[in-house]
Image (cartoon, helix red, strand yellow):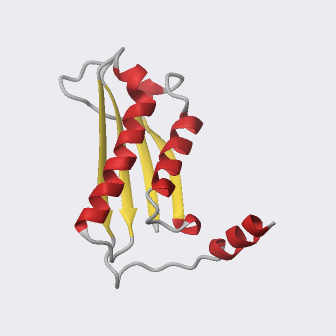
Amino acid sequence: MAHILIEHSSNLRGRIDLPRLVRAVHEAALATGIFPIGGIRTRAYETQSYCIADGHPDNAFVHLSVRVGHGRDLATRRKACEKIFGATCDELAELSGSMPLGISVEMQELHPELNFKKNNLHEYVRRRQAK
C-alpha cells in the first residue's frame, strides 16, 4: 500500500501539468517494486491558503506525503522515498529553474493495528492484465 498525496500552492495552477506529475509520481512508486499495483493511490490537491518563507506571492511549494503500510525496513522505505522524490524533482526541474519553489517528500508508515482497508482492486487489476 502506498497512498501519495501531492499538495501544491495555488500559484502553480496552470504552470504544472498536474496529470503528468501525478502519473510520473505514480509510475515512480510502481517502479520501486515494493508496492502492489492494486494498493497505490496517487492524487493531487491545490492549497489556497498558505504562506511560504518571506511571504512573497511568487514563492511556491509542492509537497508529497507518502503513506505506506507497515512492515518494510527503513532502507527499503528510504530507497522508495528517494525514487519518488527524484521523479518529482525531475518533473518539476524546469519550473524550479524559473521561480522560487520548495519541493519536499515525506514518508509515513501507518500503524499496523490502526489501518483498516477493504480493497477489491487487486483482483480487477489481475484480470485486466491477463487479457
Q: Quadrant of the C terminus?
A: bottom right
Residue 64 visible in the displayed image:
no
Q: In the displayed image of the protein, which residue is found farthest to the right? A: 131
Residue 70 visible in the displayed image:
yes
The answer to whether 61 is drawn above or below residue 116 in the figure is: above
> Could you say which is closer to the camera, residue 116 or residue 86?
86
> Could you say which is closer to the camera, residue 14 or residue 24?
24
> Could you say which is closer to the camera, residue 107 or residue 45?
107
Quick check: 24 left or right of 79?
Answer: right
The answer to whether 27 is drawn above or below residue 110 in the figure is: above
Could you say which quadrant of the image residue 95 lies in?
top left
**Residue drawn at the location 50% of the way across and 27% of the way down:** 16
Q: In the displayed image of the protein, which residue is found farthest to the bottom? A: 113
Residue 29, image x, y percentages: 46, 54
Q: In the displayed image of the protein, which residue is found farthest to the top? A: 98
Residue 103, image x, y percentages: 31, 35
Quick check: 24 left or right of 59?
Answer: right
**Residue drawn at the location 26% of the way across and 71% of the way down:** 73
The answer to whether 12 is drawn above or below residue 84 in the figure is: above
Residue 99, image x, y percentages: 34, 17
Could you say which quadrant of the image residue 126 lies in?
bottom right
Could you say which quadrant of the image residue 96 lies in?
top left
Residue 113, image x, y percentages: 34, 85
* Picture mark count: 0
Quick check: 123 left or right of 84?
Answer: right
**Residue drawn at the location 31% of the way across and 77% of the way down:** 111
